[in-house]
Image: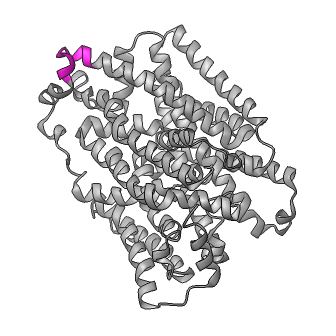
Amino acid sequence: MQPLDYIIIVVFFLLLIGIGIYSYFKVSSSADFFTAGGKLPWWLSGISHHVSGYSGAVFVAYASIAYTHGFVMYVWWALTIAIAMIGTIFFIAPRWARLRSKTGIQSPTEYLGTRYNLPTQQLMAWSGVIVKLFDVGAKWAAVGILLNAFMGVPIVTGIILSGVVTLFYVTLGGLWADVLNDFVSFIIQVASGLVMFIIVLVRLGDGPVGVLTMWDRLPAEHSNWFNSPYTVSFAIAFLVINFFSYSGGTWNLATRFISSPSGKDAKKAAILSAVLYLIWPLILFYPMFAAPIFFPNLENPETSYSLMAMEFLPSGLLGLLVASLFSTTLSMTSSDANTISSVITRDILPVIMKKVKFYDKKQMLLLARVTTFSFILLTIIIAFNAKSFGGVIGLIISWFAALLGPISIPMILGLLPAFKHSGSIAAILSIVGGLFTFVVIKIVGGMGVALELAGPLMMSLALYIGYACIVRKKVPEKVEQLLQDIDVD
């Protein structure tokens, strides 16, 4: 890192602070803070949805898998997201926007009280908040590793630095600050990613055809679409998980659709995000795939991308790349914090503290900022203890992905009329059964990564659909009305 690199990083931090201050003046209520008042343009929503799927973990944990296993990294991650988004585009995204316009929701779990009942809503809200603590903690740990690799900053210091910056701007500006940072992150990521792609292609020395000939210089299995333990069954499991996640089971992604002006706008946002997932990771991951050629036999593959960047990027561009890694991670974590805050503020606290229901606009906005601040603080503490949960890869793949299904199945399928007979008991059985399956698999061990991922999800799905088929209760009128209201703009 040269002085110019540090200057670029400082300018980036100042830009984030500026975004926070600018967004502060666009926020006058909790609806503005959590959903941008339902005025988020489709193109900004689509870019934000896409960028919110990245974090420093992509350049640490996923870079490690690209280094050790090759092209399969794109297949089971980006390609499965793009395919899964087809269902999101046609069935789910428009319904989230209609929920806000028809019922006035500000959080993804707010509608669950009507769709199921209060106990079910509380179970899902609490479970989701706890899972997200681990997920965001993993992302702070990843950015700490990146800062350590690039700048020699101790991992704990890197976590604190990135956390404090996020605390500032997202607490001030809410969703507006978050999506504007996403847009800036996307521009920086594309610029630095294209430069890195071109430089690596030049260094390989085969011209444009190096995109194809590179694979001849790597182990044969690196060009395979599937490479154990990332098998076909693993990819299918991730495909199903990604449908529920990117449809809104990952709550910050639901917020992008909820904040859209209409179902039509939400649908366009989902299309844009899906196309970006299909194309952009092929360019972004190319240097990660090529890394074994330049740095064979690395003891710690998690450092592969940072080593490539420091080796090839000139002064200034390295700073731009580090800024892009920062921005993607900070946008993702701030996005999570904003959404979790909406769930705590709108769905959990009013049940615990009855007086919250009677707060005026100013008090609700203050409460939103306090809960956002508190959530980020807790995730930073978890990041300090990431090794206790299996490291960055363990937290993201084993914990978050496996726990996502049981929580998101009742939320996403609950939007669809086809599953209207699955009521509160089906939802609770689905959540408890999925979480119990996760615990059993963890205790038994040795069942393989695919089963570890798919087991909880398949159990939840079977219980959610199976109970409704066996015990076919009459659908409450309020549920029929809700599903009818969100079926069309």
Q: Residue at x 48, y 29 (%)?
A: 325
Question: Would residue 253 be visible to someone looking at this image?
Answer: no
Query: Residue lying furthest front in this view?
Result: 489
Query: Colour scheme used in the picture?
Result: one colour
Left or right: 376 as drawn, with respect to 208? right
**Residue 373 appears in the figure:** yes
Main SS, magenta residues: helix
Q: Position of residue 71 (x, y in %)?
A: 24, 39
- For the point 46% across and 29% down, the residue is 146
Residue drawn at (41%, 10%), measured in percent from left and top? 314
Question: Looking at the rendering, which quadrant does residue 399 occupy?
Answer: bottom left
Q: Is residue 407 magenta?
A: no
- In the rendered image, which quarter contains the C terminus? bottom right
Q: Position of residue 252 (x, y in %)?
A: 57, 50
* Residue 202 is a magenta residue: yes
Q: Which residue range is magenta in the image? A: 201-210
In the rendered view, tell whether residue 84 sits above or below residue 24.
Answer: below
Q: Nearer the viewer, residue 422 or 292?
A: 422
Taking the image as shown, residue 29 lies to the left or right of residue 328, namely right
Residue 184 vs residue 192: left or right?
right
